[in-house]
Image: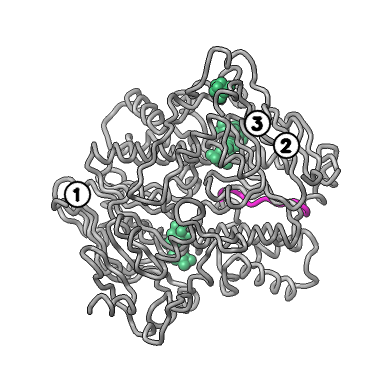
Amino acid sequence: MSEREVILAISGLQTEFKSRGGSVRAVRDLNFNIAAGQTLALVGESGSGKSVTSLAIMGLLPQAGYIAAGSVLYKNRRGEQLDLVNQSAAQMRQIRGAEIAMIFQEPMTSLNPLFSIGDQIGEMLLLHTDLDATARAAKVIEMLELVEIPAAASRYHDYPHELSGGMRQRVMIAMAMILKPALLIADEPTTALDVTIQAQILDLMRRLQKELNMAILFITHDMGVVAEMADEVAVMYAGEIVEQAPVQQLFMRPSHPYTQGLLKSIPGAGGITRSEDGRLQAIPGSIPMLNAMPKGCSFGPRCAGFVSGCQDSVELAVTEPLHWVRCSEIGVNAHV
Amino acid sequence: MSEAFISVKNLSKGFTTSKGVVQAVRDVSFDIPRGSITGLVGESGSGKTTLGRAMLRLIEPSAGSISFDGIDLLDLDERQMRKMRKRMQIIFQDPYSSLNPRMRVLEILSEALIAHDIGANSTERKAICISLLEEVGLAAEHINRFPHEFSGGQRQRIGIARALAVEPDFLVADESVSALDVSVQAQILNLLRDLCTKRNLTMLFIAHDLSVVEYLCDQIIVLYLGRPVEIGSAEQVYQRSAHPYTQALLSAAPIPDPSKKRSRVVLKGDIPSPYNPPSGCAFRSRCQYAIADCGTELPVAVEVANRHFSFCKRTEIII
Ligand SMILES: Nc1ncnc2c1ncn2[C@@H]1O[C@H](COP(=O)(O)OP(=O)(O)OP(=O)(O)O)[C@@H](O)[C@H]1O
Ligand SMILES: Nc1ncnc2c1ncn2[C@@H]1O[C@H](COP(=O)(O)OP(=O)(O)OP(=O)(O)O)[C@@H](O)[C@H]1O
Ligand code: SF4
Ligand SMILES: [Mg+2]
Ligand SMILES: [Mg+2]
């Protein structure tokens, strides 16, 4: 792999929520880089902190949330290095949209029910370009066509509730892409879509990525999509990265017991996973509560390989070039 | 096959908008045997949610009939329908907009229990709520939280818990696991399966993830622009799919293996406008087998195997 320009470098990121019983830590000691033109997939258990991570990067954490430590270095189009953690609200607004765009997990939370979809997408152009109304409308329709909204011109004046779930998601994608961002953060962008549209959207994202040399942080739980889109994969569990590797290596040699369980839970395709009684193989138990984290490895209580040493703190360790795992059992072996 | 618990006949639903009428569901008929799961798959905008909601009369069908355990639902007045609702529940596609942001989980679940007279007092209801949360893989401590304090997948599970709270006979699950990671998804799918067996629950499972549907469902209906294009058992539809659209759908699913690149049946052409669908077979504008004949009349159901139907004129060439 040739050296590419890193445009997003996250280090030591820690995100907390104020709650009744004090603060809880949703994301701990997070480190990763994304280079221009590359896709990092963030996968992991529901509730593990993927969306919180993306919101922290964008400066969009909900009221109770705040960044307790760490930095989010972003290299903008002019080549300046900015720490997004200490930008003003006005600076962040400028960066969002023009530099970094985000597609949210639940489209209805970010579409305004009172405005037509055409106007909402056009708003991005109004805020960030000098185009006149006619040119904006033309661009919006072009974008709606690009995301395969049928009869795009006639849908321009539709309100969000008049669209199917998948169409709303495509409207979100159109809104995110219209300013040709340098970094796209996509939180489950195709989860609401059927596979034929998903295939088209993934193609579209790849095409735009190539054209614009765009970096993508792709949050998804669909390992099929990961296999198709990612250059590198980071697996999160209970607020931290437990494994990170180039995509081929992760699928070929998943090393963390959680990653192994995750890959075995996929229904269908490849190594199918039904036990004798026809049930899917699931990882027993559930992710710990943020205010009741186990000691040491956070996956310990659910891990088949648990030994008492797992209660000591565990660091990410290298198992092979570019492949990191947070498991004391594997870490130990990797060092010998 | 056992007797139909739910029987949908010639169901249609159109929406009138400023630009004309969208025929979201067009003349759909099928049966669901008691205790079984029917999967509804199809492109975004094909009418899955509309069909699911119309079956529960959450929106009024434009035409057709729905028989539920021998009762014709469209004959019921509002009061009778309200009573009926206890027996039929829906898990909504968008968990965020269907959970009241100002209510705690306990209140959200209790509300459902109270509405249907379940649990003698608040202590009893709380206990039921906790066991429901645990059933869907959340914890007792989650009970005092508000919806926005959960992740997307966790919210989805609250929606599932609320639907299960009233112990329905029939459940419409609209994209209920698509927001979940695969390991939690596996837990929920196992749970839904168990419920169908243990409680004899009948289910309409709407999804676009084909591998999930294959695993879970007994029968599968593939919709395209409001009409079924293929109906059959999970095995028939997956192993021996007969309709060109189903075949394209199956080949578009991504494979969880980065070293494999699958050869896709790439669908050419745009998705037609639902305001103005193609005449005859609605799929013909994107179908590689289409001939002039496909535009003249609606394809009728061809039984390609026992109870396996494909709505395609050229079935004999395709299979
Ligand atoms: N506003 C909030 N207040 C308190 N806790 C929160 C809040 N928002 C999220 N959390 C908690 O932070 C953790 C991480 O949530 P996040 O939404 O990042 O999960 P996720 O990995 O995106 O999961 P999913 O795959 O289900 O979307 C969860 O335990 C969640 O309950
Ligand atoms: N209230 C409404 N007013 C006008 N049109 C509507 C309304 N609800 C749905 N539609 C239209 O009906 C069609 C079917 O929508 P529906 O939501 O049933 O699709 P779906 O198959 O559930 O799609 P998805 O997979 O994206 O959720 C779409 O063209 C949609 O735009
Ligand atoms: S009826 Fe014609 S257009 Fe429709 S699926 Fe069959 S071959 Fe294709
Ligand atoms: Mg999320
Ligand atoms: Mg829907």
Residue occupied by mark 2? B30
Work out how far the residue at label 3 is from the one at label 1, CA to CA, in angstroms. 59 Å
- Let me know if residue A163 appears in the view: no
Q: Looking at the picture, which amino acid does disc 2 mark? A: Phe
The quadrant in which residue B132 appears is: bottom right
Would residue B303 appear left or right of B153 to someone viewing this image? Answer: right
The residue at the point 57 percent across, 74 percent down is B141
Q: Nearer the viewer, mark 2 or mark 3?
A: 3
Q: Are marks 3 and 1 on the same chain?
A: no
Q: Looking at the picture, which amino acid does disc 1 mark? A: Asn
The residue at the point 63 percent across, 62 percent down is B191
The residue at the point 41 percent across, 58 percent down is A51
Q: Position of residue B101 (x, y in %)?
A: 57, 58
Q: Position of residue B242 (x, y in %)?
A: 58, 32
Residue occupied by mark 3? B304
- Let me know if residue B263 appears in the view: yes
Span shown in magenta: B86-94
Q: Are marks 2 and 3 on the same chain?
A: yes
In the displayed structure, A332 sits above or below A108; it is below
Q: Nearer the viewer, mark 1 or mark 2?
A: 2
**Pointer 2 indicates a residue of which chain?**
B
Q: Looking at the picture, which amino acid does disc 3 mark? A: Val
Cβ atoms at labels 2 and 3 below 8 Å apart: no
Q: Classify mark 2: helix, strand or loop.
A: strand
The quadrant in which residue A146 appears is: top left
Q: Classify mark 1: helix, strand or loop.
A: loop
- Between A91 and A117, the one lying in front of the other is A117
